[in-house]
Amino acid sequence: MQTTTQSTEVSATLIADIAPKIHALKKTFSNGNTKVFSWRVAQLEQIKKMVVENQDDIFAAMQKDLGRCDMESWTAELGGVITEVEHSIKNLKKWMKPRKVSTPIVAQPGKSYMLPEPLGTILIIGAWNYPLLLVLSPLVAAVSAGNCALIKPSELSANTSSLIAKMVSEYLDNDAIKVVEGAVEETTELLKHQFDHIIYTGGDVVGKIVMRAAAEFLTPVTLELGGKSPCIVDSSTDLEVTASRIVWSKWMNAGQTCVAPDYVLVEKSFAAPLISAIKNKITEFYGADVANSKDYGRIVSERHCSRIIKYLADQNVVFGGNHNLSNKYIEPTLVLDPSADSPLMQEEIFGPILPIITLDNIGQAIPYVNDREKPLALYLFTKDSRFEQQVLTSTSAGMVCVNDGFMFAANPNLPFGGVGNSGTGAYHGKIGFDNFSHLKTVMKRSFWFDVPLRYPPFTDKKFKLLKKLI
């Protein structure tokens, strides 16, 4: 059965309604309603209930938006949201507790601690490639920290956007959590207003716009921007398992994943076996005719599909390359040794093309990675522990996974975030709670034993004693 998508127009929020929504959220926060433990847990439970009870509608919306099968949508999005909720509920009391620190002798008798407090109203701007996960996962963190939130889903995944707006209105506290639907005009209007934190997931062009707008209010931002994530394959690796994991992580969601391997680095002598293994796994996973696989998705729009197809011009395609613009279909494609200055290697692909770059020796992979912007993710397949440590200590990336694809995203104890051009800030689990909290410094001192050493009049004796104490 051929996978298809159904485009639709998003139902935009009236511009005139945006400011009142923001004002209402700020009023709710000032009333203190969101700060109590019981409210936070209740909303987290409702987020889980919302996802579980509406899973069929969510699957249908994602099928229309991205041509994605139900199991992939569950694995990539719904399951992740549920895991985040359960992890947060389990640990929330501990995260909310004051965090004691030692007090120096000069401040004795006294005690010192950090008190987590919510920031206020959080703006969550989601992305179209994982349209549910990339708004609800930040929402879990924002709610856990006791904040109000305004969600802006992506208009490109219009069916999912509309469903999110409907579900939030039915399941969550609408005084504290609201949705604005729309495109550029609505997002531009949102950014004219002051929030207490903004989290944006998407490309660096819009990321810069968000950061400039936030700077007008000195608003902190979390930016998840992606980039060209390298995949280094050492000849010592387990070839069969490596090929399976590369194919899974690259062609999930038809390659439209910010942490998908963007290109592979491999020694010339090992390139042919690796390419052969990857070809075999593509056929094993999706069949000889990928276009008719129910498990392979579609590109989100004809515009993005056309952009990706242009990357194939004048390239050495060694597998795949077939495409159908009207069906927004591009076959899993391997390109061998594209020019370093080609658009394919200069821009984030965000699609189902995987360049294979051959090197004289695998050690050249480290300077190759370091000569480029810091990636959101880096993947290394090797059995050589010395080379593993060399890569870990000599390269910089937001996240690293050794001998697999983006499985780090399945661990709520690990932060998800970039570095440098690939993003700033992180969330998931406690890191997400802290990201949307202010750790307020508190010192409490006793009135007894008030040593007058620090008070005027100052003497040489006081000065000498003070220097010994501090």
Image (cartoon, rainbow, N blue to C red):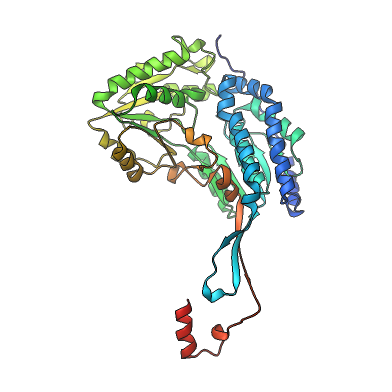
* Quarter assignment of residue 180: top right
Relative horizontal placement of residue 402, taking residue 214 as reference (left or right): left
Q: Is residue 117 above or below residue 44?
A: below
Residue 469's x, y, as percent? 48, 78
Asked whether residue 384 is in view, the answer is yes
Residue 265's x, y, as percent? 32, 30
Which residue is found at the position 49% from the left and 30% from the top? 257
Q: Is residue 318 above or below residue 461?
A: above
Residue 459's x, y, as percent? 49, 91
Q: Is residue 342 above or below residue 447?
A: above
Q: Quadrant of the N terminus?
A: top right
Q: Is residue 164 above or below residue 67?
A: below
* Quarter assignment of residue 131: top right
In front here: 465 or 139? 465
Residue 125's x, y, as percent? 60, 39
In front here: 222 or 315? 222
Asked whether residue 311 is in view, the answer is no
Relative horizontal placement of residue 39, taking residue 233 as reference (left or right): right
